[in-house]
Each structure stands twice: as C-alpha cells, then as structure tokens.
Amino acid sequence: MIAVTFALPQESRDFRHLLRQARTVGPGRSLLGNVGPEEVLLAHTGVGPAAAAEHVAALLAAHRPRLLLSTGFAGGLDPRLATGDLLIATNVSAPALVAQCRALLAGEARASFGALTSQPLPAESVAEKAALARATGALGVDMETAAIAAAGARAGVPLLAVRAISDSAREPLPVPFAEWFDLAAQRPRPLALVRYLAHHRAQISPFVRFVRGLTPARRAFTRFLVRFISAAPSCI
C-alpha cells in the first residue's frame, strides 16, 4: 500500500477521481482504492503543521503503508519556478525515491529538484518569499510536509514529497490567508473572502488568475502521481 496525503480535498480532486473501487476507511475517512495494480490510501491532513502531524500520526497508527507521499500545492521561492511546475523536495524525501523521480522526469523542463521549506503560515508577499528563499535556500514553501516527514520518520515509512507551484516567487498571494481560511477551525471562510474582494476590487483579477492557475498545478502533480505509482511496484 502507498499512502498519498493532501492538505485539502480541493487538491486531491483529480487524483480522487482516478481511484478505482474506492471505499472509505477510518480514521479520518480516508479513501482506499487502486491505481493500476497498486493499493492506494488517500488521506487529507488538514492545513498547517499541527493538523498534519495529528492526522498523519493517526493514519500511520491505523495502517502500514510501504511508502508515504506528501503532495499538493506549494508557493514558489525561486523565481525560475512558474505556476504548475513540479518540485521534488530532496531535503525531506528518501534518496532512493528521489533517484526514481529523476529517472521518471528525465528531460522534463518543468520539474525541479531541491529543498522545500515548511512554515506555519504562507509567505504572502514577494518580499516575504525572497527573504524566506535567502534564509532557507529552498525552492518552494508549504505548511505540512515537515510535519508529515517527521511522522513518517518516527514510523519508519519512507517519504516522497512532490509539490506543484501554485503561486510564483514573482507574485504575491492575491488574498491574505487569514481572509479565506480559518486555521483553528480548519475550514474555508467564503463570506470573509467575498467581503475582502468587495473592499479590495483591484484584487479580483489577480485572485481569478490565481484560482485559474490551480488547475494546471493540480493536473501536474496528479499526472506525476499516476506515473510514479504505476512504476512503484518495480522500483520499491
């Protein structure tokens, strides 16, 4: 079994539809199904390190996957990465799995290998992203992978972290994180988002562009997951 984690159902949507014979299993109402001959457990960790640590610990206590994949969106910190590019996080992934990714992605212009940093909150401005890049040397930033990696290490399950860039280093997030997501309650804030855009009309077009960019980013990591999982029985 391979376990694949996403923060939110919005990220897993395309991959979820590819699972064959999917059924709900506890805890956390994960989905267990198949991609080709491989059994796959799809789980949502929630947003942020605390939620991810709790959910992944529970998942690994209830199941024993031979491999753990952390995937979803990440913010770009290296200006060379564009929206929809893949980032294979070499600093937290098992070296053998990184090597397999290099073989699978040989010649892919929109796949990068390098460090991914996890932070408790998103880097929202171009200046924040640049400062974080200088401080960490990372190519991208997310909120969950470090916690997932720690849980996997405690359980002795090798990790592969693969993220797709949702917003490049050259662009700020169009809406502050706190305006659209309640981290404590782990739920979106749609009314707060509408109110924010109503009072900041100049941000409507950037927000629409950002949302549109999530589709190719989601497709990028979904395509990769299918390729990697299809090859996994012969490489792990």
Image (cartoon, helix red, strand yellow):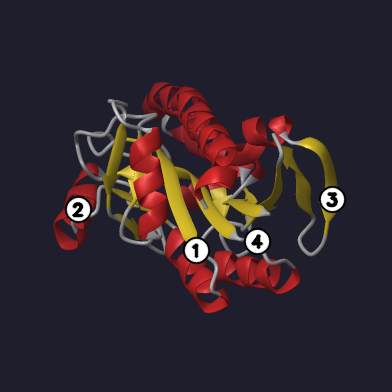
The spot of residue 215 in percent (x, y) is 52, 25
Badge 1 or badge 2: first in the primary sequence: 2
Taking the view exactly as shown, the residue that stands out farthest to the front is 234
Q: Which mark is residue 158?
A: 1
User: Please, what is the three-letter code of the amino acid marked with disc 2?
Assistant: Ala
Q: Secondary structure at mark 1?
A: loop
Q: Which residue is mark 2?
A: 133
In this picture, is 210 found above or below 133? above
Distance in Å between CA atoms under marks 3 and 1: 24 Å
Q: Which residue is mark 4?
A: 65
The spot of residue 33 in percent (x, y) is 77, 43
The quadrant of the rendering that contains the N terminus is: bottom right
User: Please, what is the three-letter code of the amino acid marked with disc 1?
Assistant: Pro
Dot in front, 3 or 1: 1
Q: Which residue is mark 3?
A: 24
* Pointer 4 with pointer 3, Cβ within 8 A: no
Query: Relative to the observer, which residue lies in front, 176 or 197?
Result: 176
Distance in Å between CA atoms under marks 1 and 4: 9 Å
Q: Quadrant of residue 54?
A: bottom right
* Pointer 1 with pointer 2, Cβ within 8 A: no
Q: Residues within 10 Å of mark 1 (few under 14, many from 20)?
A: some
- In percent of the image, x 19 and y 36: which residue is there? 79
Distance in Å between CA atoms under marks 3 and 2: 39 Å
Query: Relative to the observer, which residue lies in front, 127 or 197?
Result: 127
Dot in front, 1 or 2: 1
